[in-house]
Amino acid sequence: MSWGPCFFYYHCPQCGKRFKYATDLIADLGPRFGLCPECGAEGVLEKEGARTPDDLQYEEIEE
């Protein structure tokens, strides 16, 4: 049984945006992984894992 994709959930300490990155983007994005898509600040990791009940409150970053 698969739980689907795993994510790293972040919030931005500068602009407050909530966002998430799928773990499979780590290799593609390198040092840009975890950066806020709005202002470019380094996100603060809140949690990681499969989709959570509040998943829709986080913008999924796909690059």
Image (cartoon, helix red, strand yellow):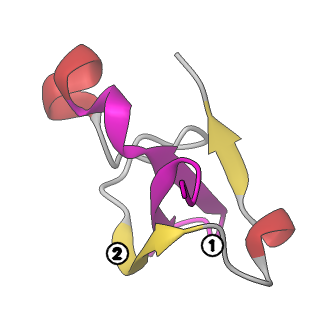
Cα–Cα span, label 2 and label 1: 13 Å
* 31 lies above or below 12: above
Q: Residue at x 27, y 21 (%)?
A: 29
Q: Position of residue 8 (x, y in %)?
A: 41, 61
Q: Disc 2 or 1, which lies upstream in sequence? A: 1
Give whichever of 57, 36 is nearer the camera. 57
Residue labelled with disc 1: 16
Where are the magenta residues, as a range? 1-26
Left or right: residue 51 compared with residue 49: right
Q: Tell whether position 18 is magenta.
A: yes
Give whichever of 10, 39 is nearer the camera. 10
Looking at the rendered structure, the kind of residue marked 1 is Gly
Task: Please identify, in this view, whether the residue under mark 2 or under mark 1 is nearer the observer.
Answer: 2
Looking at the rendered structure, the kind of residue marked 2 is Leu
Residue labelled with disc 2: 45
Residue that protrudes farthest toward the front in the picture: 1
Give whichever of 1, 6 is nearer the camera. 1
Q: Tell whether position 61 is magenta.
A: no
Is residue 11 in view from this perspective?
no
Q: Position of residue 13 (x, y in %)?
A: 44, 75
Is residue 15 in view from this perspective?
yes
| The N terminus lies in quadrant | bottom right
Instruction: Tell me the quarter of the picture where residue 58 sits.
Output: bottom right
Determine the secondary structure under disc 1.
Answer: loop
Q: Residue at x 34, y 75 (%)?
A: 45
Instruction: Tell me the quarter of the picture where residue 44 sits.
Output: bottom left
Q: Residue at x 30, y 56 (%)?
A: 42
